[in-house]
């Protein structure tokens, strides 16, 4: 029985860790498949989390008692609103990357690096100037102890409907929508063509610039959303950092070899590693091994490098990713 | 008569200045540096504008702060930068510029050879880690100890860079992706090593005798600190020889890039890898070598940061990224601003340190010092844009000229 409870605990906290990774990695997947690399995800996540958390701070009930008394529905609505607003902030922020790398044909890695530098600087600067401290603290706990009657279903209830926030369901929906969009719609297939061979796609009348803009802004929206979901699941305050989750999401994408359901698996695996790194001492057989927590934290990155080496011949990476598209070079 | 002559000469000298200026502004160096200067100007204007907006918002009471910001004092403090407290703050500026210049050289050198070394943060952390291990564990006399630590840091950074180059040249793994992974591996590896090598500071409870571990390392042995002879010159600020090492590195990199066959070969590979391969150069070896040299510079920066009295490495991610890894990322900014040229990188590193110090002082005018980070990041964004912008303006100029020609042609008809 204790073992069971432990497994459920590990599982739910793995889900919690993996969801922001999944959402951001799906955004990165759409972006890269259109042929634009986006290593600005870290910065965009920070910006989305910053705006989203600030919104929550303003919109939530202003006393602790009232905040604690919110029903699951209230919490979920607040969460979704926060995520959407964080997403919109991320979208607007990623416009800078789209403008620089698509319209101005600047180097994609450089403009992304600039965004990664801008976001924490602005978040901390504005927070300190306006709120007076670098922390944005709010009072709502988004985690729902039980999701209505669904929590009573044996096993499944314990796995998916206890101790979760609504972000989990959003993540799954986003993954499915992205899959359908990419592989089952005309626009999605065109988008992938842009990433594989933009010149060929252009010659068939696809507007490369438009599609790439759309893809970068979508990834910005999802990254902003993921940033908020990260901040909302970690604690009740945002401190101007997303602890490298934006970069980890890129690793997830690579580990998942640019395929939606492998990305889901990769996100789960990385989430599990993060969870184990925190709570390995409560897992009997891992506690007996007594491996340093930092080695668990290292595994996702090492695994990604190993996968990159192993798949260097059979990589599904979009062929034109990272290359500037210029009609004139056709 | 004589006096008149002198005046005349002085007059002639001053008459020459505008011509010299013009020659300078028309010169190739200046034209190349123009995008960076425009970006710097844009960043500073953005910063000052932000200060104005905040001042205005407080003035019209959109939000309230305890101490009202003082606009003009703030701008003056920001622009005064490293001169705010005379020689003392100037010394502090040089102290902070040293690792920035080194990481800038690291990234810049990689750029020159056609590689994007975003892995400087990891190489820097690894260099700092080895310097700590050698600095804490060994006890040897002074000049040898700190020299050994520096060498250890360089070797470590070089190894970390080499791995990235190896993955790229042998397994075709893109260096940006490999770098990102190697950064995090370096960080967690460092945390692990601090435990594994017993480097963390121990508190011993005087009553119970219980030992507990601090969240930071021991400080280095005194013999491993960099010499601080320059402190007398800089009004008591404990500046060390880091800046001299950085200047030496600038000179060495300049010579390597511009005066040696090796530098020429590596640069050629940067221009066109296929062509240089066709010309018989070993491009795989070149990639590994470039990354190793690039990593060496970043590792040196890491060693310099840590080889300072009472400096510790903390065992949490936030401090690690703000104190060590961010310097590596700054290297990207500096390399971009300095156009990857060693001398340009030296100047850009000084500039970044200058504006950061200015940022430190603006809180005396009730602004937040993070403004300096906002300004530098805006500068980088603009410098990414400005090259493209220049091409755009050039095209527009040509188009305008063509339009004008067409227009006059039309009138004639």
Image (cartoon, coloured by chain):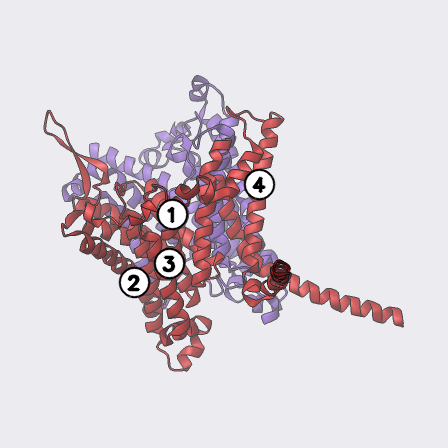
**Mark 3 vs mark 2, CA separation in Å:** 27 Å
Residue B352 relative to residue B203: left or right = right
Crowding near the residue tagged with mark 3, few <14, some 14–19, many ≥20 C-alpha atoms within 10 Å: some
Asked which secondary structure carries label 3, the reply is: helix
Q: Examine the rendering and report whether any part of residue A307 can be seen.
A: no
Q: Residue at left 46%, top 37%?
A: B361
Chain rendered purple: A
Chain B drawn colour: red
Q: Mark 3 or 4 closer to N-term?
A: 4
**Mark 4 vs mark 1, CA separation in Å:** 23 Å
The chain containing the residue under callout 2 comes to B
**Mark 4 vs mark 2, CA separation in Å:** 43 Å
Crowding near the residue tagged with mark 1, few <14, some 14–19, many ≥20 C-alpha atoms within 10 Å: many
Instruction: Give a yes or no on whether discs 3 and 4 share a subunit.
Output: yes
Query: Residue beneath label 4, please?
Result: B48
Query: Residue beneath label 1, please?
Result: B96
Query: Residue beneath label 3, please?
Result: B247
Asked which secondary structure carries label 4, the reply is: helix
Q: Residue at left 53%, top 52%?
A: B381
Residue A210 relative to residue B109: left or right = right
The chain containing the residue under callout 1 comes to B
Asked which secondary structure carries label 2, the reply is: helix
Q: Position of residue B310 (x, y in %)?
A: 25, 40
Q: Position of residue B304 (x, y in %)?
A: 30, 51
The chain containing the residue under callout 3 comes to B
Q: Residue at left 48%, top 50%?
A: A27
Q: Position of residue A261 (x, y in %)?
A: 40, 52
Marks 2,1: beta carbons within 8 A: no
Q: Mark 3 or 1 closer to N-term?
A: 1
Query: Residue beneath label 2, please?
Result: B163
């Amino acid at each position: 029985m204790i073992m069971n409870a432990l497994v459920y605990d590990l599982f739910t906290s793995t889900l919690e860790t993996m969801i922001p990774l999944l959402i951001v990695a799906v955004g990165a997947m759409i972006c890269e498949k259109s042929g634009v690399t986006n290593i600005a995800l870290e910065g965009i996540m920070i910006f989305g989390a910053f705006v989203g958390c600030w919104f929550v701070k303003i919109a939530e009930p202003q006393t602790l008692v009232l905040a604690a008394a919110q029903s699951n529905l209230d919490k979920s609505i607040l969460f979704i609103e926060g995520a959407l607003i964080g997403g919109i902030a991320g979208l607007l922020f990623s416009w800078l990357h789209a403008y620089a790398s698509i319209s101005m044909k600047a180097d994609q890695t450089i403009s992304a690096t600039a965004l990664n530098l801008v976001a924490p600087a602005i978040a901390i600067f504005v927070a300190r100037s306006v709120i007076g401290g670098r922390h944005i603290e709010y009072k709502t706990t988004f985690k729902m102890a039980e999701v209505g009657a669904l929590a009573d279903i044996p096993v499944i209830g314990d796995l998916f409907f206890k101790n979760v926030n609504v972000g989990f369901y959003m993540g799954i929906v986003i993954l499915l929508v992205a899959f359908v969009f990419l592989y089952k719609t005309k626009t999605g297939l065109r988008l992938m063509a842009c990433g594989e061979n933009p010149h060929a796609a252009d010659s068939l009348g696809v507007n490369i610039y438009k599609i790439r803009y759309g893809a970068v802004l979508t990834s910005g929206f999802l990254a902003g959303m993921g940033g908020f979901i990260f901040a909302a699941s970690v604690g009740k305050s945002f401190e101007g950092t997303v602890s490298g989750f934006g970069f980890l999401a890129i690793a997830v994408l690579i580990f998942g070899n640019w395929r939606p359901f492998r990305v889901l698996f990769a996100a789960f695996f990385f989430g599990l590693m993060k969870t184990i790194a925190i709570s390995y001492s409560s897992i009997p057989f891992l506690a007996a091994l007594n491996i340093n927590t930092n080695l668990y934290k290292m595994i996702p990155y090492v695994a990604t490098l190993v996968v990159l080496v192993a798949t260097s011949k059979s990589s599904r990476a979009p062929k034109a990713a990272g290359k500037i598209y210029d009609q004139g070079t056709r | 008569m004589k006096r008149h002559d002198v005046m005349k000469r002085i007059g002639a000298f001053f008459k020459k200045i505008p011509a010299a200026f013009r020659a300078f502004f028309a010169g190739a160096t200046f034209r190349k540096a123009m995008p960076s200067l425009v970006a710097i100007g844009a960043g500073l204007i953005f910063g000052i504008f932000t200060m104005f907006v905040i001042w205005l918002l407080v003035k019209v009471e959109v939000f309230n702060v305890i101490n009202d910001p003082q606009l003009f004092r703030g701008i003056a403090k920001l622009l005064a930068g490293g001169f705010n407290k005379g020689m003392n703050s100037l010394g502090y500026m040089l102290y902070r510029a040293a690792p920035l210049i080194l990481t800038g050289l690291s990234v810049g050198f990689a750029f020159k050879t056609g590689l994007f070394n975003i892995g400087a943060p990891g190489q820097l952390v690894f260099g700092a880690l080895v310097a700590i291990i050698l600095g804490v564990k060994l006890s040897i006399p002074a000049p040898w100890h700190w020299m050994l630590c520096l060498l250890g840091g360089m070797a470590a950074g070089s190894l970390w860079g080499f791995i990235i180059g190896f993955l790229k040249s042998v397994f075709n793994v893109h260096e940006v992706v490999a770098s990102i992974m190697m950064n995090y591996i370096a960080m967690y590896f460092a945390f692990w090593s601090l435990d594994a090598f017993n480097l963390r500071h121990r508190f011993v409870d005087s009553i119970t005798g219980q030992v507990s571990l601090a969240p930071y390392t021991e400080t280095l042995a005194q013999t491993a600190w960099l010499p601080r002879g320059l402190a007398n010159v800089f009004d008591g600020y404990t500046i060390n020889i880091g800046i001299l090492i950085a200047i030496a590195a600038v000179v060495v990199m300049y010579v390597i890039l511009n005066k040696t066959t090796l530098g020429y070969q590596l640069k050629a590979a940067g221009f066109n890898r296929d062509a240089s391969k066709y010309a018989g150069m070993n491009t795989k070896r070149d990639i590994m070598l470039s990354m190793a040299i690039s990593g060496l510079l970043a590792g040196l920066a890491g060693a310099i940061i840590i080889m300072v009295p009472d400096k510790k490495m903390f065992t949490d991610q936030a401090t690690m990224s703000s104190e060590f890894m961010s310097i590596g990322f700054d290297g990207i900014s500096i390399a971009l601003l300095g156009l990857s040229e060693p001398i340009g990188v030296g100047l850009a590193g000084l500039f970044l340190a200058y504006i950061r110090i200015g940022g430190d002082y603006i809180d005396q005018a009730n602004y937040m010092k993070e403004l300096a980070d906002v300004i530098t990041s805006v500068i980088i964004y603009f410098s990414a844009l400005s090259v493209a912008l220049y091409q755009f303006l050039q095209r527009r100029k040509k188009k305008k000229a063509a339009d004008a020609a067409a227009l006059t042609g039309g009138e004639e008809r």
